[in-house]
Image: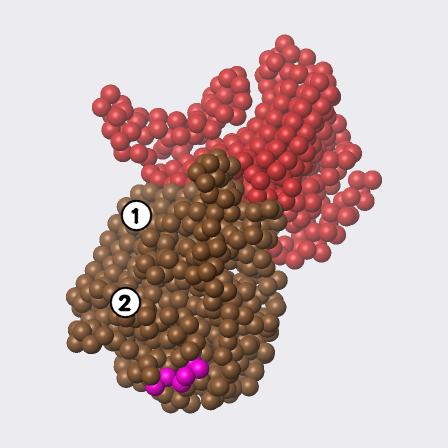
Chain colours: A brown, B red
Amino acid sequence: MAAKEARDAVGEYKAGWHDPENATIRFDFGLSEQVVRDISALKNEPEWMTDIRVKAFHHFESRPMPTWGNMSMLEDIDFDKVCYYLRSSDATEKDWEDVPEDIRNTFDKLGIPEAEQKWLSGVTAQYESEAVYHSIREDLEQQGVIFLDMDSGLREYPEIVKEWFCSVVPYQDNKFSALNTAVWSGGSFIYVPKGVHVEMPVQAYFRINAKNMGQFERTLIIADEGSSIHYVEGCTAPTYSTDSLHSAVVELIALPGAHIRYSTVQNWSANVYNLVTKRGIAHENAKIEWVDGNIGSKLTMKYPAVILKGEGSHAEVISVAYSGKGQHQDAGAKIHHLASNTTSKILSKSISKDGGRGSYRGLVSVSPKAENCKLNVVCDALILDDGSRSDTYPTMEVANPSARCEHEASVSKVSDEQLFYLMSRGHSEEEALALIVNGFFEPFTRELPMEYAVELNKLMALEMEGSIG
Amino acid sequence: MNRVKIMDAASLYKSLGEPDRADHLWRYTPWKRVHPSGDLGEIPNAVAPKLTLSCLDEDVALLGISIEEGIVGAEVLPESDEVTSSFIRAAAGDSVYTLRVENNFVASAPIVLDIDTGDSPCALHLALDVGRHCEFELITQVSGAAPWTGFLRSGRIGDGSILNDVVIGHTDSGTLLRVDSIAIGRDAQVRVGTVSSGSDRTKADLRYKMGETGGHLNVLGSILSADKMHLDHHVEIHHDAPETFSRLDWHSACGGNSRTVGTGMLRVAKGARGADAGQLFHNLLLSEKAEADSIPELEVSEHDVVGCGHGTANGPVDEDQMFYLESRGFDTEEARDALIAAFLNSTLVEMGSDTLHHWLAEHLQDELADLSS
């Protein structure tokens, strides 16, 4: 019954539509230095940004593909068949009614206006390559919070962007961060002034709507001393028969005493490559949390990272991954303890079903000068049926004897006792399984804003449909 | 026959490229660091070590167990790393032996296989041919002053056999390259212990295949590293058959400027229903400049498993335990030594019988003293 209710509530895969491609500017497929320069020129960017883009492009060209993760899937990416820039609306809009109708319909289906009314303090919605809608509550503006799409941020606050851009994720970091730096468009730019606490979560939806469309948003969040912010990012995409590429970079800077929580629920359709670099730097007594849900995509390779640079800083990564038919979720976390008295916690949960593969890949390091660090890593995996697979690849590098480090992982099936208990109380086997799976993900969902948690539970109930018998 | 195999191994090695450091096996100790000369194309003319088989109880006659020259069967598992196994086979040349154990062999006291490396580069390929329903304990002690030692063990533990198998790396200095490539027979119960206390540099690639129903394997390690030692152990256990059980428990105490690396891989294949697999790495860091790295990996492709898990923990000597001992009259140094010894002993004691344990503990006294100093 739970599954049926969920289907009634959610309908068919609710994000599985797409609008006509009424794009106003679309580049030809393929990438070259000229394409990179054209993107930069089109945006009228400062010279230093063009230079970074070009350097990043050459690094991308020379850098080989990763030799880990899912190499066979990575090799299927044809970078010459990706469109690296597409703009569907000429101007960044502030008034929802001014957004073109077909685009607005798409976002209406995603429920953004309602979400904004009930929960959110600001919205910036990424449609293809640029933000088309942006609003922020007046009280936040009065507090001095800057919440813009990244292109506007570069135009209006070039000095702040120049100071922090590529400071956490340099373009040389990996092949996909180089690609993103070369062709980035859109994303969010947030600056929270000293001592300001953004009470309500700030939200952005990202969405790919054209086949073979790459999406390369760039997000930069700077929380100044003693401030706090919770940023929520959701991704949905229409189902298409050809592959799409999503390669974002997110940089977080938590200055002394600041707190940043970055929550993501990605539900890309099963033809999207989701290759994302997310990293934050935590200064003295700062705290960075990544809450990361990976439900969709064909291949996800994403390892939210925190560099604990300041004494007393703290990092947490809570992630869940669901791998269904044809999917490989290669997700994890990386935490580097560079300073003394730093603490971190990683909780990773994954479910594999219908031949899907879930992998946890993590790295935790303690540098020689970091005294009295504490870290804890827990990975749990459920394999629901024959032919599915779960992997765990954790790495711990400890170079200071005062560190206390713990890691534990388990892979198991749904226990017959739990199923029997629930079925003896009137649930069908399918409902019982859905309940157990939702309970398994509960440490993650309780950290999400309520509407996200409700939607995630419904999605998981849908995924469990037909899994028995 | 041997010459053909030597040619095959050398050709195979030369056909392989330098291993990729992205592979966890080579991430912390690249092949160049454990190759005898660093010139990767070169295969040394290693000498054969001196082998001596005896029993801890001199009254026990060695009937049914023997060392024979040459190898028949006992191929290296396809799951093993080709670079290391082909290199040792090529370097070993005629230094190939078989430890043959007849069906139903039983020994009441541990059997000791001494391998004296001498003082020149040395290599050995030893095949284990353990028959059915045997029950015995084997201590293999590698000692000597060779600057480089390559030691490959391949073979199979027979159906229903019960074997406690301990290998002690006890060389004075130099590099020890060790490879295990061993299949566990149906319903066999095997404990494989590794005690590593010698050599400046150790690279061990230990792989065990549970390809037949009911196999039961415990892999245990007690690793003592001091000075500038670099001890890297990779343990891989393959559950390919139903109802197989494995546990890995690895304890490393790391002092001085040394570094220990423990990488584990538990691979449960599709069809290995009822598999029960777990691995634990514990690292005790004893000095500011010591470093310990652990990567316990899991790949599970079968959903109907009893459970698969792993864990790792790093930390210093526990202050509460120190306080407890000091409050009962131990001075600081004695308390620390006792806790280090207890840490290493917790895996040593699981490696076999009381007799075996006492023998191991006695042999490790000196190394413990070195580590503490």
Q: Which amino acid does the dot numbered 2 rest on?
A: Lys
Residue, x 63% and y 23% (percent of image)? Answer: B162
| SS for callout 2 | helix
Q: CA distance from mark 2 to mark 1?
A: 40 Å
Instruction: Name the spot of residue A427 as percent of width and height, x first.
Output: 46, 43
Residue, x 50% and y 25% (percent of image)? Answer: B350
Please tell me which residue lies in front, A3 or B288: A3
Q: Residues within 10 Å of mark 2 (few under 14, many from 20)?
A: few
Relative to residue B292, is residue A161 depicted above or below?
below
Residue, x 51% and y 37% (percent of image)? Answer: A416
Residue, x 57% and y 32% (percent of image)? Answer: B245
Same chain check for tags 2 and 1:
yes
Quadrant hosting residue B96: top right
The chain to which mark 1 is attached is: A
Q: Residues within 10 Å of mark 1 (few under 14, many from 20)?
A: many
Instruction: Name the spot of residue A323 as percent of width and height, x first.
Output: 52, 56
| SS for callout 1 | loop
The residue carrying mark 2 is A118
Q: Nearer the viewer, mark 2 or mark 1?
A: 2
Quadrant hosting residue A201: bottom left
Instruction: Name the spot of residue B100 as percent of width and height, x first.
Output: 72, 25
Q: Look at the image and tell me whether residue A180 can be seen.
A: no
Relative to residue B32, is residue A189 depicted above or below?
below
Instruction: Name the spot of residue A217 as percent of width and height, x first.
Output: 41, 74
Q: Look at the image and tell me whether residue B110 can be seen.
A: yes
Q: Quadrant of the C terminus of chain B?
A: top left
The residue carrying mark 1 is A373
The residue segment tinted magenta is: A98-103
